[in-house]
Amino acid sequence: MGTLQVIFCEMLIRVVQYFCEQTGRNGNAVSYNGLEIILQQLQKLAPELHRVHFLSYLNGLSHDDYLSALENLHCYFDYRVFIAACSTALAIIWSKN
């Protein structure tokens, strides 16, 4: 992914986090489907961003969609475990060299 795409993705994540914060303060200020569409677009643009799953979890939780929230929380932690395992494997490989 190029530098501009990374900057755009980080900016988009900040915007989505802002929407989540506003939803928490003002009830359902942002529609569930509206935010999910943004998050799905972000996931397509940058599938390596695991934080999208966490934001989807928060969105589902704030709109009482507990099944979707739980599914996204599992995806978030599955990805985190995968990344941790890859990091550990790389550290072992590098230490042997």
Image: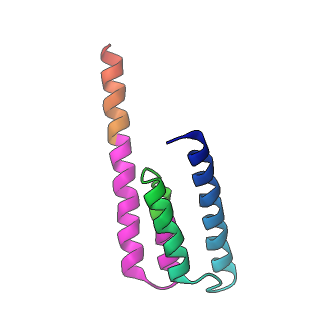
Q: How is the image coloured?
A: rainbow
Q: Where the C terminus falls, by quadrant?
A: top left
Residue 6 in percent (x, y) is at 57, 46
Q: Does residue 54 show up?
A: no
| Magenta part, dominant SS | helix
Q: Which residues are magenta?
A: 55-84
Report if residue 77 lies within the magenta region.
Answer: yes
Residue occupying the far top of the picture: 97
Return the residue nearer the eye: 46 or 63: 46
Q: Residue at x 35, y 64 (%)?
A: 74
Q: Residue at x 43, y 83 (%)?
A: 65
Q: Residue at x 57, y 47 (%)?
A: 5
Residue 2 in percent (x, y) is at 54, 40
Report if residue 92 lies within the magenta region.
Answer: no
Q: Residue at x 30, y 16 (%)?
A: 96
Please state the total of marks drawn on the protein image. 0
Residue 76 in percent (x, y) is at 41, 59
Q: Does residue 97 show up?
A: yes
- Give the quarter of the image for residue 75: bottom left
